Image (cartoon, rainbow, N blue to C red):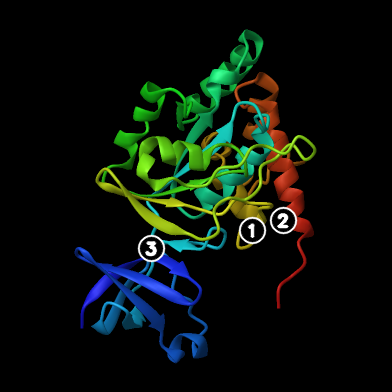
Amino acid sequence: MPEGKIIKALSGFYYVANGDEVIQCRGRGVFRKNKITPLVGDHVVFQAENKDEGYVLEVKERKNELVRPPIANVDQAILVFSAVQPGFSTHLLDRFLTLIEHNHIRPIICISKIDLLDEEEEAEIAKYVEYYQSIGYDVLLTSANEEESVQKVIPYLENQITVFAGQSGVGKSSLLNALRPELELKTNDISSHLGRGKHTTRHVELIEIGNGLVADTPGFSSLDFIGIEAEDLSFCFPEIREYSVNCKFRGCLHVAEPKCAVKEAVESGEIKKYRYDHYLTFLEEIKDRKPRY
C-alpha cells in the first residue's frame, strides 16, 4: 500500500502528498469507531483508484500533536508576536511557549512589525529579546515590509515541519506572503475597536517554502493547559527548570516551600519576575482546572 503525508484537511477530505502527486482522500469509518482523527502532518497509508478518490487506511504513530492548531509531527513552532498593533504581550507569549515546550516542539520567537516602533518602544522590546535569548530561545525580529529581515527566517525552515502560530492580527499571513508571494494569503487590518485582527486563515495546510513545510494556522482566541499537570509546569520554563535542581525539596512547586532556589533566583533578578508571575498564574489555572471524566 502507498504511503504519504497529509498536507491539508478541509471539509472532510484529506489531501495526501505522495511524491509529486496529491491525492484527495476520505477517512475510513474505522477512524470514527476508534476515535482517531487524521491530522495535517500525519504519515498515513492510503489506497486510491485515482487522484480524486482515495481512502486513508492507517495513521502511523505520531511524535507529537497539537489540538489548536490541529496538526501532528511538528518539528518547530515559529511564534509570531507583533511589537505593536496589537502590543507585545509577554503573558500570551509565555502561554504559547508553555504549550509548545510541553509538546517537545522547538519554539522560535518571531517579533513582527518592528518597522513601526519608535525609539522608546524599540528599547523596551530589546530588553525582552535579550532575556528570552539568555534562557535559550532564538528570537527573530522581522517586518513584512523589509526583505532583509524576512530572509532571516528562511534558514530556520530548511528540512523542518514548522507551525506558524500566534495571536490574530500579528502578521503571520503577511510574513508568509513575504516569504512566498504567490501564496496571496488573505490578511486583514486590526480592528480599532477590538485591538485585534480577524481570523484570516480557515484551515491548516502545509505549504512548501524552500526545502521545508510550513503550516499557516487559524488564529487563536484562547489557550488552555489540558494535559499539563502542576508538577510538569516548571519543565516548560527553561530558567525555572535550571534552578529547580537546587531546591531543597524534590517536587518543589516554587510557591511556599522553604529553601526554594527558584524563588531565590527571582529575588536576585536572575529569573525575571514577570516570568515567575506568569508561572504562578498558570499554576493556579492548572490547579483550579475541573477534573475531566
Q: Earlier in the sequence, mark 1 or mark 2?
A: 1
Label 1 – label 3 distance at C-alpha: 26 Å
Query: In this rendering, would 192 be left or right of 4?
Result: right
Q: Position of residue 115 (x, y in %)?
A: 54, 19
Q: Residues within 10 Å of mark 3 (few under 14, many from 20)?
A: many
Q: Residue at x 58, y 50 (%)?
A: 200
Position of residue 73 measured from the top left corner of the image (x, y, whole percent)? 38, 60
What element does badge 3 sit on?
A: loop
Residue that appears at 46% across and 62% down:
71
List the residue tagged with mark 3: 41
At x 52%, y 20%, the residue is 130
Foreground: 7 or 280? 7
Q: CA distance from mark 2 to mark 3?
A: 29 Å
Q: Nearer the viewer, mark 2 or mark 3?
A: 3
Q: Which residue is mark 2?
A: 286
Sequence order check: which comes first, mark 2 or mark 3? 3
Task: Tell me the quarter of the image containing the N terminus.
Answer: bottom left
Q: Residue furthest top?
A: 119
Could you tell me if the residues under marks 1 and 2 are in contact, i.e. CB atoms within 8 Å? yes
Q: Residue at x 72, y 56 (%)?
A: 286
In the image, 94 versus 174, the foreground residue is 174
Does residue 163 appear to the left or right of 212 in the view shown? right
Rendered position, 221 above or below 3: above
Q: Position of residue 201 (x, y in %)?
A: 54, 53
Q: Residue 60 falls in which quadrant of the image?
A: bottom left
In the rendered structure, which amino acid carries the disc numbered 1?
Answer: Glu
Say above or below: 267 vs 276. Answer: above
* Mark earlier in primary sequence (1, 3): 3
The numbered mark at residue 229 is: 1
Please name the amino acid that badge 3 sits on: Gly
Answer yes or no: do the residues labelled 2 and 3 have beta carbons within 8 Å? no
